[in-house]
Image (cartoon, rainbow, N blue to C red):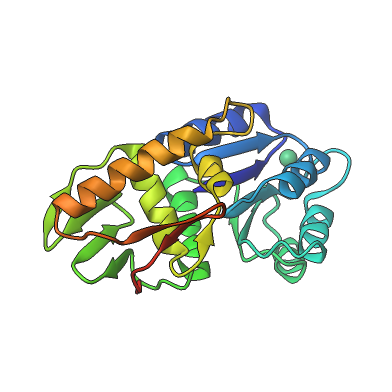
Amino acid sequence: MKLLLVEDEALLRHHLSTRFGEAGHVVDAVDSAEEGLFQAQHFNHDIAIIDLGLPGMGGLDLIRQLRSMGRAFPILILTARGNWQDKVEGLTSGADDYVVKPFQFEELEARLNALVRRSSGFVQAQIRTGELVLDLNRKQASVAGQPVPLTAFEYRILEYLMRHHQQVVAKERLIEQLYPDDEERDPNVIEVLVGRLRRKLEAAGEPQLIDTVRGQGYLFTGHCQ
Ligand code: CA
């Protein structure tokens, strides 16, 4: 998924970007609320992690602005301050959860995954339709219990389409799931990846789950739960 990280401590920002990148996420990491606002205006993120103590505009103001812009993605706040007023104010301003520094990466990741899962309406750590099951923790797909050998990119596309099942997903959205905004983007890559994904699902016994909607994008036709 695509993650917006707003953190002014360079070392922590770098560390979190690296770890989330390794975990298969696309991270837009910025060091100020102003830059975070810009990113959120131009890209579609699945979740934001926002440090409260930022130079210039503060994290709380950023959260309020994001919510007033209609951005509904889950927001997790990071705060060095342990007092309860900060947490209450953060949650009141529109954040969904918080982690107090210092923290273990694993705790942050677990909270983040839980937030994203809930926001896309899935309570379990897996998404299924018919015989196709996506294991969100292990990042694996299987059909009737047999693993489907997907590359990391193919998996990310499948997960995004299944999270947004019954909706037309624009190619541009899928590209954002694969590359940070500063990397070169080639829409043809998506066509190739979706083609491969279809063939692999078909070989595993699940054909015709992904429709092409001409000029608009792709539609995952299975009912996921
Ligand atoms: Ca800070």
Judge by depth and name the residue closer to the eye, 115 or 40.
40
Q: Is residue 12 above or below residue 123?
A: above
Residue 9 at what x, y percent from top left?
Answer: 68, 32
Q: Out of 221 and 2, give the one closest to the viewer.
A: 221
Residue 20 locus on image (x, y percent): 47, 39
Q: Ligand 1 is found in which quarter of the picture?
A: top right
Comparing 73 with 87, the one in front is: 73
Horizontally, is 118 left or right of 97 in the view? left
Q: Residue at x 19, y 53 (%)?
A: 202
Horizontal arrangement in the rendering, residue 53 relative to residue 128 (left or right)? right
Q: Nearer the viewer, residue 85 or 172?
A: 172
**Observer able to see residue 94:** yes
Please report the residue visible at 66 percent of the width from the left and 27 percent of the height from the top.
Answer: 10
The answer to whether residue 79 of the structure is visible from this angle is no
53 shown above or below 185: below
Vertical relation: 148 (above or below) 187: below
